[in-house]
């Protein structure tokens, strides 16, 4: 298995533009997580899905952020409009069953908003 | 979920055992202890987890005190590739939330 696949690996965009980050979880996994990592705040859980349904989005910083999971093999995290303070590494992770010990992380998307 | 306390950094000589402590004095009876690590620029990687018994796998051993208020992750023969940030996390069984703290930055030196 190729693991969790995120795209793009790097994204540079101008303030005010829409940004879409993509994630393909491991086949057969039914929980998916989006995290954001910065030097100041560390790793923050933004939202997680179980069986394509958002379970907890309390970590989503504000209405500019939205996440969708239209099917078991694809999820997006969208920022509109983007701001410089959104610059971070965004990680997607998946796990096989709810409560599973092991979550597998992707390589991350490094977002820079200028 | 209960909070954890870890030292911000540790050093270890290559080939020696690395013992990483974690305090979780407010842990509840239904919370497991999990360990993940993050090697520079990569996504976090699962290492091991346990409830109250000591656990061992091919990567590490986890020692949990009898009162469950603290634990130690042991890397028996540290290598340079073990240099990473190690996160100790407590999580209620059957929930999905993995909340990461600040972790311990382990530096393995030759």
Image (tube, grey):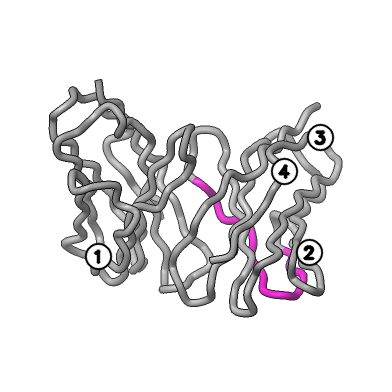
The residue singled out by tag 3 in the image is B14
The secondary structure that dominates the magenta segment is: strand
Q: Secondary structure at mark 4?
A: loop
Q: Is residue B34 left or right of residue A47?
A: right
Q: Disc 4 sits on a residue from what chain? A: B
Q: Earlier in the sequence, mark 2 or mark 4?
A: 4
Q: CA distance from mark 3 to mark 2?
A: 21 Å
- C-beta proximity under 8 Å, tags 1 and 3: no
Q: Chain of mark 3?
A: B
Q: Chain of mark 2?
A: B
Give x and y (percent) for residue B96. Answer: 44, 68
Q: CA distance from mark 4 to mark 1?
A: 39 Å
| In the depicted structure, whether residue A86 falls above or below residue A97 | above
Name the residue tied to disc 2.
Answer: B63
Q: Are marks 3 and 4 in contact (CB under 8 Å)?
A: no
Report crowding for label 2: few under 14, some 14 to 19, many 20 or more residues within 10 A (C-alpha): many
Measured from the top left, where is residue A52 in percent x and y? 24, 67
Q: Residue furthest top?
A: A114
Labels 1 and 3 within one chain: no
The answer to whether A75 is drawn above or below residue B85 in the figure is below
């Amino acid at each position: 298995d190729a693991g969790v696949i995120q795209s793009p690996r790097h994204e540079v965009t101008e303030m005010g533009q829409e940004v879409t980050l993509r994630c393909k979880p491991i086949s057969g996994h039914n929980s998916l997580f989006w995290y954001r990592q910065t030097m100041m705040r560390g790793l923050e859980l933004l939202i997680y899905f179980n069986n394509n349904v958002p379970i907890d989005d309390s970590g989503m910083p504000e209405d500019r952020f939205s996440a969708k999971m239209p099917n078991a093999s694809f999820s997006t995290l969208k920022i509109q409009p983007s701001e410089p303070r959104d610059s971070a590494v965004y990680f997607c992770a998946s796990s096989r069953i709810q409560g599973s010990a092991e979550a597998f992380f992707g390589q991350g998307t490094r977002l820079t908003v200028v | 979920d209960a909070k954890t306390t870890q030292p911000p950094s540790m050093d270890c000589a290559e080939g020696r055992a690395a013992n990483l402590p974690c305090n979780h004095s407010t842990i509840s009876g239904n919370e497991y202890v999990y360990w993940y690590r993050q090697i520079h620029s990569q996504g976090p990687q699962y290492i091991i987890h346990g409830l109250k018994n000591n656990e061992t796998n091919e990567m590490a051993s986890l020692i949990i005190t009898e009162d469950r208020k603290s634990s130690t992750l042991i890397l028996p023969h540290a290598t340079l590739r073990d240099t990473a940030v190690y996160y100790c996390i407590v999580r209620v069984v059957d929930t999905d939330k993995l909340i990461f703290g600040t972790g311990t930055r382990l530096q393995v030196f030759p």
